[in-house]
Image (spheres, helix red, strand yellow):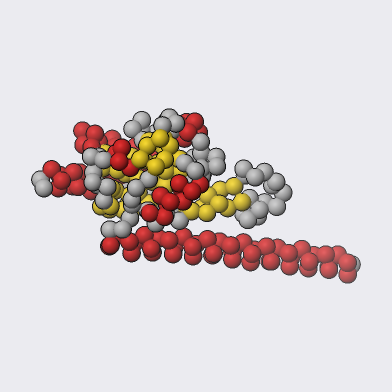
């Protein structure tokens, strides 16, 4: 009887410790993400978001930021294995492009992967092909992705299955990417204009882009 009681107490203690560990991990992730978002918001006022890059698009072609000069860029950082945030963001971008009508010709949506290990061009092509055909997927080496993410003040981090509580997984490819989720509007001259959340009303985003296009036309 005492042995059963001791066993039950040990199981309860293990469950409590696991819950505490999980909460601490979640809290640490949230703190890191919030710190990144505060930096992004602070950078917004100083217009220091964005910059040059050299990456590979979903067709395997090397491109740079200069290839998109003359167009407004709507930039999102994510990854193709993302279970929720990234598909939601790309679906919203598709709605934005639809809402823009003819003005969509002045806009180039970009999906930049923060998971270059898995997101090779063919994988990106399959992912972006599920959304608006005008979306271009971009990937690169880990160093290239780190560089462009730093310029956009983007937070991202690999989270393994073991960190999420699955101690049985031994697959190196079994992980998620924790990342900030903003849409960045960049002007035709390469300068940062505005930031949106990935769940913001597509009609609001389209209105803001149309206002930016009109402002440039009247300048």
Q: Is the N terminus in the top left, top right, bottom left or bottom right quadrant?
A: bottom right
Classify residue 40 as left or right of residue 6: left
Which residue appears at 41% of the width and 32% of the height? Answer: 61
Q: Position of residue 153 (x, y in %)?
A: 39, 56
Q: Is residue 99 visible?
A: no
Classify residue 215 as left or right of residue 54: left
Q: Nearer the viewer, residue 54 or 78?
A: 54
Which residue appears at 31% of the width and 53% of the height? Answer: 195
User: Is residue 149 shown above or below 30?
Assistant: above
Q: Position of residue 137 (x, y in %)?
A: 41, 37
Q: How many marks?
A: 0
Classify residue 60 as left or right of residue 74: right
User: Is residue 3 shown above or below 193?
Assistant: below
Residue 53, quarter of picture: top left
Which residue appears at 54% of the width and 65% of the height? Answer: 27
Q: Is residue 183 visible?
A: yes
Q: Position of residue 95 (x, y in %)?
A: 32, 38
Residue 73, quarter of picture: top left
Residue 164, quarter of picture: bottom right
Which residue appears at 10% of the width and 45% of the height? Answer: 218
């Amino acid at each position: 009887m005492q042995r059963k009681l001791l066993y039950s107490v040990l199981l309860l203690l293990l469950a409590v410790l696991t819950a505490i560990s999980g909460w601490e991990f979640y809290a640490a992730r949230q703190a890191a993400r919030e710190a990144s978002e505060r930096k992004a918001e602070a950078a917004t006022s100083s217009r220091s978001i964005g910059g040059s890059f050299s990456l590979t698009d979903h067709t395997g072609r090397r491109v740079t930021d200069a290839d998109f000069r003359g167009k407004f860029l709507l930039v999102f950082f994510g990854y193709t294995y993302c279970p929720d945030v990234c598909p939601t963001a790309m679906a919203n971008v598709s709605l934005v492009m639809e809402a823009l009508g003819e003005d969509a010709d002045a806009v180039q949506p970009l999906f930049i992967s923060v998971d270059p290990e898995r997101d090779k061009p063919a994988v990106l092509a399959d992912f972006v092909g599920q959304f608006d055909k005008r979306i271009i997927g971009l990937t690169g080496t880990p160093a290239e992705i780190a560089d462009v993410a730093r310029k956009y003040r983007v937070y991202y981090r690999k989270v393994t299955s073991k960190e999420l509580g699955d101690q049985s997984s031994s697959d190196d490819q079994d992980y998620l990417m924790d990342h900030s989720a903003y849409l960045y509007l960049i002007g035709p001259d390469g300068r940062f204009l505005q930031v949106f959340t990935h769940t913001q009303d597509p009609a609001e985003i389209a209105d803001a882009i149309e206002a930016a296009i009109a402002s440039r036309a009247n300048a």
